[in-house]
């Protein structure tokens, strides 16, 4: 098609365009140019399209495979969890039934009601409690209403019985008398010694009225009662009871504390939103992994409790469905999809016909698959970008190289000397420029070792480095000096002194910078630091005091290290003053120094020297004290005459940081 505005017919060849052998006319060069595209564009489009199609297919396939694998692993984890829980319940049941069976199956002291042979009972039950750690207590009820109970202290029993601190076992004996039941309690320590006895305590407890006695009396079988909240300790427990083989009206029973089961349910979570609980034959929860739910459940079983649980969508779904099998299934509850496995507890005694329910939100289960999908998408995007860059490499080589050089120059402007300039190019001019920038970076970095980098950056941001100029403003100045530094220099070699000073100055530099200040000058063994310039700081006096206190604390550690090496301590004096000063850059045209000048600076320097007369480490002026009132602790030292000044000044020792409300 001819160019728009061309007067020739579409089939008419332009000047210099030969006709085809078959007599047809060729397309014009302008039209052919419009129908073609640069090779790098076609290559990029083709590469990107292929990579997108392949990546999308692979990522989608990987997501669904990962999702199915995660669900399969979750199913297996749920089964293993349920099996472990059932095994734990069976172990609890087996050990407890064996203990109760031993007591109730052989002639022993338990055929004699209390108070007969109580010591033999105590020795026997103490050993039972020792061998079966999950037991809360073992007891015997008699047809005359007497009762003997061995209690493992702890878990609420210590407080309930007001037991001595070193008691580990308590024995509760109840005898029925004309006036009612009388309770005796004895406490033993770990060695079996009786450490206290309480006698003649009235009680209304009668074992013959308790569910465990009624269920087991007269029967040869072992029975189970619970789970229920124990009346005294409010712990979740189950009672296993059996009548004595020699007298079916004597019932032996033991309480199992199910804290280990609740802890096990709570600890074995597959995801943060997973839940595990045990339901009875009616679908009502009896043990739950959620502590808040468990507290509400226990409250319903205590006297004066609510009597009902608040609705729970997952529990309600389990309760309303009677067709559960051992296979996991998906349910909808509270707007979320859950993977649920219901496993029956195959135990004759402990929680018979109950079911273990394990649930996990699907969105949390497949979260790793979704993260993998995002990672795959990110990788695909990187591949696409890499393909585009590869297709356009030749055309964009110079531009990219120059962009990287520009970024390197910007880093140099920001005083970033950590990142080297690494630009590789086949263009010799760009390679030479890259090497030159690296040499400039190294040169500037070497120079910056003699100038505080952060100080220069803040100065540029604050606009203070604009030539020889100064402005009056309020600042806080701090001067330091080392006691007897001349003597230290005489007694040690110059290399050793320089090394010690370097470590010493590192501490001061870090401390001043940490408290928003700047070291303006290193003056031999001293420093001159300033706050509120070049960067504004409304709390400059407080920060200077905190810096001095912090430096003193850190120098104590430094001096301990010096002493351990046999080196002298650097005892340091500090002088702090706040006031007006002229702040700016002074010096020659070819060399400037940023500093502050004026009486404020001189007073700070004199305060440092006045520590010699006052025997202090940190001296500050009244201006500093007034600015820090209520924030820093000061000790007034009266007025003193500073060297070189006609007027005495009021001085204060900086003691510490103020704690509590401010004082006038």
Image (spheres, rainbow, N blue to C red):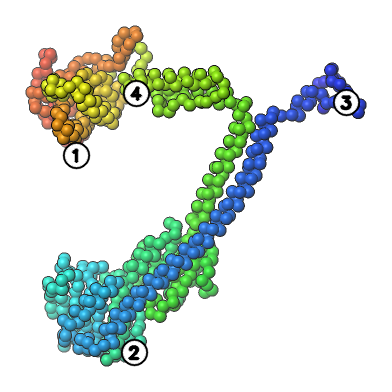
Q: Residue at x 15, y 73 (%)?
A: 192
Q: Earlier in the sequence, mark 3 or mark 4?
A: 3
Q: Earlier in the sequence, mark 2 or mark 4?
A: 2
The residue that label 3 is drawn on is 20
What SS does tag 1 mark?
Answer: loop
Does residue 283 show up? no
**Relative to residue 161, is residue 623 depicted above or below?**
above
Between the residue at mark 1 and the residue at mark 4, the CA separation in whole angstroms equals 35 Å
| Crowding at mark 3 (Cα within 10 Å: few <14, some 14-19, many 20+) | few
Direction from residue 335 to residue 541 in the image, left or right: left
Judged by depth in the image, the label closer to the viewer, 1 or 4, is 4
What SS does tag 2 mark?
Answer: loop
The residue that label 2 is drawn on is 219
Q: Earlier in the sequence, mark 2 or mark 1?
A: 2
Residue 645's disc number: none
Residue 659's disc number: 1
Between the residue at mark 3 and the residue at mark 1, the CA separation in whole angstroms equals 100 Å
């Amino acid at each position: 098609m001819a160019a728009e505005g061309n007067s020739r017919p579409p089939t008419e060849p332009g000047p210099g365009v030969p006709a085809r052998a078959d007599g047809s006319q060729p397309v014009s060069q302008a039209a052919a140019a419009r129908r073609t595209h640069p090779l790098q564009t076609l290559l990029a489009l083709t590469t990107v399209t292929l990579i997108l199609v392949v990546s999308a297919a692979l990522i989608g396939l990987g997501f669904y495979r990962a999702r199915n694998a995660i669900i399969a692993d979750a199913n297996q984890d749920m089964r293993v969890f349920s099996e472990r829980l059932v095994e734990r319940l069976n172990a609890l049941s087996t050990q407890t039934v064996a203990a109760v069976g031993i007591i109730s199956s052989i002639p022993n002291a338990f055929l004699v009601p209390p108070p007969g042979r109580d010591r033999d009972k105590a020795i026997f039950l103490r050993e039972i409690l020792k061998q079966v750690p999950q037991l809360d207590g073992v007891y015997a009820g008699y047809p005359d209403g007497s009762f003997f109970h061995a209690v493992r202290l702890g878990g609420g029993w210590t407080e309930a019985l007001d037991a001595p601190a070193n008691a580990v076992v308590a024995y509760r004996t109840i005898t029925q008398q004309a006036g009612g039941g009388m309770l005796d309690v004895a406490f033993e320590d770990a060695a079996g010694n009786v450490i206290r006895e309480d006698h003649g305590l009235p009680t209304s407890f009668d074992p013959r009225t308790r569910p465990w006695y009624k269920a087991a009396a007269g029967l040869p079988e072992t029975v189970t009662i619970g789970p229920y909240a124990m009346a005294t300790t409010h712990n979740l427990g189950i009672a296993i009871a059996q009548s004595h083989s020699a007298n079916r009206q004597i019932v032996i029973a033991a309480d199992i504390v199910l804290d280990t089961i609740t802890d096990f349910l709570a600890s074995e979570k597959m995801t943060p939103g997973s839940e595990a609980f045990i339901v009875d034959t009616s679908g009502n929860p009896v043990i739950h992994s959620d502590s808040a739910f468990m507290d509400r459940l226990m409250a319903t079983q205590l006297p004066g409790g609510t009597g009902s649980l608040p609705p729970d969508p997952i529990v309600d779904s389990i309760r309303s469905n009677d067709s559960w099998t051992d296979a996991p299934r998906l349910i909808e509850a509270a707007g979320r999809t859950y993977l649920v496995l219901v496993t029956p507890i195959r135990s004759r005694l402990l929680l018979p016909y109950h079911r273990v329910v394990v649930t996990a939100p699907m969105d949390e289960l497949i979260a790793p698959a979704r993260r993998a999908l995002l990672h795959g998408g990110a990788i695909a995007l990187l591949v696409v970008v890499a393909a585009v860059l590869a297709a356009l490499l030749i055309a964009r080589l110079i531009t990219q190289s120059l962009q990287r050089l520009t970024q390197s120059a910007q880093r140099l402007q920001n005083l970033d000397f950590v990142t080297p300039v690494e630009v590789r190019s086949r263009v010799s001019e760009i390679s030479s420029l890259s090497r030159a920038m690296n040499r400039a970076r190294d040169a500037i970095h070497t120079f910056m070792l003699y100038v505080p980098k952060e100080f220069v950056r803040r100065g540029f941001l604050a606009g203070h480095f604009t030539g020889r100029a100064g402005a009056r403003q309020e600042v806080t100045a701090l001067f330091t000096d080392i006691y007897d530094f001349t003597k230290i220099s005489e007694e040690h070699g110059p290399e050793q002194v320089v090394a010690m000073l370097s470590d010493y100055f590192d501490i001061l530099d870090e401390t001043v910078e940490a408290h928003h200040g700047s070291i303006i000058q290193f003056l031999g063994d001293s420093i001159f630091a300033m706050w509120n310039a070049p960067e504004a700081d409304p709390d400059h006096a407080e920060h200077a005091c905190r810096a001095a206190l912090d430096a003193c604390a850190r120098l104590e550690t430094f001096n301990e290290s010096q002493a351990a090496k046999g080196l002298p301590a650097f005892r340091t004096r500090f002088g702090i003053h706040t006031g007006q000063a002229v702040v700016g850059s002074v010096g020659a045209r070819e060399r400037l120094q940023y500093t502050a000048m004026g009486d404020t600076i001189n007073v700070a320097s004199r305060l440092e020297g006045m520590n010699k007369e006052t025997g202090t480490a940190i001296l500050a002026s009244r201006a500093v004290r007034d600015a820090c009132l209520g924030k820093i602790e000061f000790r007034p030292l009266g007025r003193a005459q500073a060297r070189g000044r006609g007027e005495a000044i009021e001085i204060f020792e900086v003691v510490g940081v103020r704690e509590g409300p401010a004082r006038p």
